[in-house]
Image (cartoon, rainbow, N blue to C red):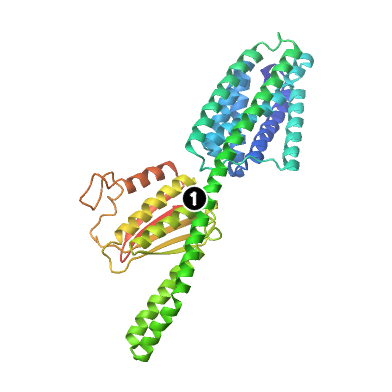
Amino acid sequence: MLNVLKYNPLNITLFLLLNSINIFLENEVIIKIFKIDEKCKLKLFLTEFILETILSLFLPMPIFISLDIVLKLCLYKIFFKLKAEKLYLAVITSEIIKTISEGMLLINTFINNLNLVYIAEITINLIIILFIKHKKIEIIVKECLDEKIKNKITLISLSSIVLIFIAKIKIIGDIEKIPIYLYMLFSLMQVAYLVVFIKNILNMINQSNTKIIIENLEGSNQRLQENYDSVRAFKHDFNNIMQGLGGYIIAKDFDGLNKMYKSIINECQEINEKQSINEDVISNPAILNLINNKIKLAREKSVKIKLEVYIDLNTLKVPTYDLCRILGILIDNAIEACNGCETKVISIKFLRDKYNNRNLIIIENPYKNYLIDVKKIYEKGFSSKKDKISHGLGLWKVKQILNKNKNIQIYTSRDKLFKQQLEIY
C-alpha cells in the first residue's frame, strides 16, 4: 500500500499479483459470512483492484487506508445491493479482518518488504476463510426487521465507521513514531470494540427476528383455529344438510337438489382452500400472512380468490417489504373492482417463465369500468371514483416502488378480465 513506483518492474508485478489475491480473499470472507450472491463478485474484484492500485500509487498511506472504508461502502452497495444495516455490518466485519491483517504493516517498518506484508495478509485471510467454512459461521440479516432496530443499527454503525476512519488517519499517519506495543494494543482494542459492536447488533437483529417469528406463529395458530372451526361447524351441520338433501330427493325436486349440492361443493372447496394455503405453499411468512388476510377480506365481500403458487417466493429478487406493498395494493384494487360484477372471482398466480428467465405474478379480476385508460392509472391522483382525495395513490405508489427496483416491471391489460402482470428478473 506504499508508493511502489520506487520498485523495479518485477517487484511491481509481484506486488500487483499479491494485492489482487488479497482483495479477492477479503471479499470472499464477506461473501461467505453474509451468504451474499456471488454473481457480481468478479465485477467487484476487478473494479476494486483497479481503483486500489491507482489510489495506492498516488495517495499517502494514511489517506489511502482511510479511504478504503469509503471505497468498500460504495462498492458493496453498488455490486451487492445490500440494505443499509447489512451493508454497515459487512463493511465493519471487513474492518475487523483488515485491522488484524494490517498489523502486518509493522513487518514493513523493519524489513521494508511490502510483498512479504501481502503474503502475511493473504495467509491470514486464507486461515479466516477455512475457519468460517469449518465452523459454518454466517450472519443472517432479514429484510423485515423492525424500523426502530434498523434506525438504531444505522446510527450506531455510522458512528463506528466515522470513529474507525478518524483513528486510522491519526494512528497510521504516525505509525513509525508509535512504539510497537502501543500500536498492537490499539489494534487489539479496535478489534475488541468491533467484535462487541457486531455482537450487540446481532443481538438486536435476533430479538427482532424472534418477534417476527412469534407474530408469524400467532398468525399460523389463528389460521389453524379458523380452519378447525370451519371443519367442526360443517361436521356439526352435516346431519341437517343430509336431511335437506333427503327432502329434495323425496319431493323429486332435482333443481333444488342441484342448487343445494353446488352450495355444499362450494363450501367444501372453501375449507380445502383455507387448509391448502400454508407454509408449504407460500414459504415466505410475510407474504403468507398478507395473502391470508386478503382472502379473508375478499370473503367478507363475497369475492373468491383462486391462488396458484408454482415458485419459492423466497427466491424472488425483490425486498419482501416492497413486494408486500405492491401485492397489497394490487389485490385491494382487484377486490374493489369486483364490486357490482356478476362473477366475483380473482385469480392470483405465481409462475416461473424459464424461457425468458423471469418470475411472474399475475393478478386477474372482473371489472365494470370498461372505459378505464390503462395508460393513466399510474398517474398520481388518477381514480375512477368520485372521491379523488382519498383515492388514486395506490398504483402511483406501486410505480414509485418499481422505480427503485430496476429488475421488476409491470404490464397492465384489459379484455374480458383486468390483468396486472409483475415480471421479476
Q: Please tell me in which quadrant of the rendered image residue 34 appears.
A: top right
Who's the residue at 72% across and 15% down the image? 183
Query: Can residue 425 be seen by looking at this rendering?
Result: no
Q: Nearer the viewer, residue 303 or 66?
A: 303
User: Three-letter amino acid code at disc 1?
Assistant: Ala
- Under circle 1, the secondary element is helix
> Eyeballing the image, is 291 above or below 269?
above
Q: x%, y% of residue 334?
A: 34, 58
Question: Extreme right residue here?
Answer: 111
The location of residue 118, given as percent across then percent down, is: 73, 26
Q: Residues within 10 Å of mark 1 (few under 14, many from 20)?
A: some
- Extreme-top residue of the structure: 177
> Residue at point 61% right, 40% down?
41
Residue corresponding to mark 1: 286
On screen, residue 189 versus residue 74, left or right, reads right
Quarter assignment of residue 119? top right
Q: Quadrant of the N terminus?
A: top right
| Residue at the extreme left | 386
Tell me what residue is drawn at x 58 percent, y 29 percent. Answer: 72
Compared with 421, 95 (above or below) is above
